[in-house]
Amino acid sequence: MYQNQSILKMNCLVKIILTLFLIILSNFANGQETTWPLQKCIEKGLENNIEIKIRQLEVKRIEKSRNSVWNQLLPTVSFNGSQSYNFGSTIDPATNNRVSSNIQYDNFFINANMNLIDFNAFANAQKNKIDIEKAKADKEVIENEYKLQILDSYYQALFTQELLKIQREQFKNAAFNLDRISKEVKIGSKPKSDLYDVQFSFAQEEKRILETEQLYNIQKMQLFQLMNVVDFSISEVVLVSNSSDEMTSVSTEISNPKIKFAELSYQSSLKELRSQRASNLPVLSSFYSISSFYYKPLNQSTAGLSSFSNQIGDNKNQQVGIQLSVPIFSGFRNNKKNVAAKIETEKSKLTITQEQQKIENQIALEKQNQRNYLQLQSKFEETLSYAKASFTTTQAKFLSGKIESISLSSVKNQLLSSEYEFLKNTLQIQYTNFKINLIKYNKL
């Protein structure tokens, strides 16, 4: 009996342990899910962004519509058939003499044409290949701009999240002071006016925390809307501050997709110019055709007239040959197209320089911001140390009754401001590092 009771207790204990383990595991999984680092936000955004999906489909469309050189030089084969009725004076197809009769005439022929040398086909094939790379670069441009949007939205929310942490931490001191002053007023060691001052300061801090929470929720909502994540509760989302050690920038060469797109546009315009010039070059082609016909007099005796199959076999004719087409005069249309294509090429070449200047100026501006933040970091750190020391002594004076709560509130606000400025400046350094890497290398 005692053994059975022991077994039952053991089973209950195992069930309790398993239940606790599942609860802890579930909480751990939920905690993992609510942590959103920057890289995760970018990956999720790229996965959900509709504009990027449209660009991906555009790349596939261009790939499928591309024609290689050999594809363009493949022969074109067509079958044609016609049926006609001749009335009055006409040519008898059987005798080739003019007769006065009505005749039904059916004609069938198959044509095949193939260009052997076509410079326009060569240029178009090369241009189509570049157009695929150009479409991919255009998609990368959209992705790069989208990453920068997510980066900006992420750090705006991160600034507010860290401010909220500081406010909540300092709010503990306000709650402590309110509780202490309330007890001292209750026993008569402090005047009630001190309690009013502390309550007013406490209420102000509560209001500031509420306003920061509201702003933080709005910024998180904007971030998740930007990522197109709508089926997720953002109330428990925690953003992660990224350390500078995670950032890599080893290359000095700029690889921004906007420059790549401009270079491919220039190459495409060169191929377009070559294609326009090819319109003035000869085309060598071959051709083959096989044809036959059937005729029948109308309203006349068909005695002695061969059957349909016999006529088709007897009247069969084949033709094969090579044709050289040399453009001589086209009303100056080709020349005008060549001039326009040449101007477009010059525009595309200048666009490369323009994009390079824009990117270099943007990088130079962000690097200057980075240097400014680094210079300010030591000043903010020094100011923060003074603010902490001042708050410690002021808090002691307030508790001993040497100063009023309004003085403590002023010093506390200075500490809050110093802590936030130091932390925000640290995050600004991270933000500019990420931004420079995205602009310069299209990666974090």
Image: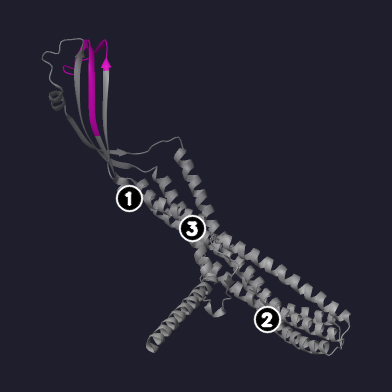
Q: Over which residues does the magenta segment extend?
A: 85-110
x then y, percent, for residue 410: 81, 79
Name the quarter where the N terminus is drawn: bottom left
Badge 2 is on which residue? 377
Q: Amino acid at mark 3?
A: Lys
* Label 2 SS: helix
Between 73 and 337, which is closer to the camera in this rendering? 73
Q: Residue at x 26, y 22 (%)?
A: 83
Relative placement, left or right, of 351 versus 69 is right
Between 351 and 420, which is closer to the camera in this rendering? 420
Between 221 and 438, which is closer to the camera in this rendering? 221
Badge 1 is on which residue? 69
* Label 3 SS: helix
x then y, percent, for residue 182: 81, 82
Marker disc for residue 39: none
Circle 3/circle 2 CB separation < 8 Å: no
Tell me, yes or no, whether the highlighted magenta stretch contains residue 98.
Answer: yes
Circle 1/circle 2 CB separation < 8 Å: no
Relative placement, left or right, of 32 versus 165 is left
Badge 3 is on which residue? 139
Of the two numbered discs 1 and 3 on the same chain, state the one appearing first in sequence.
1
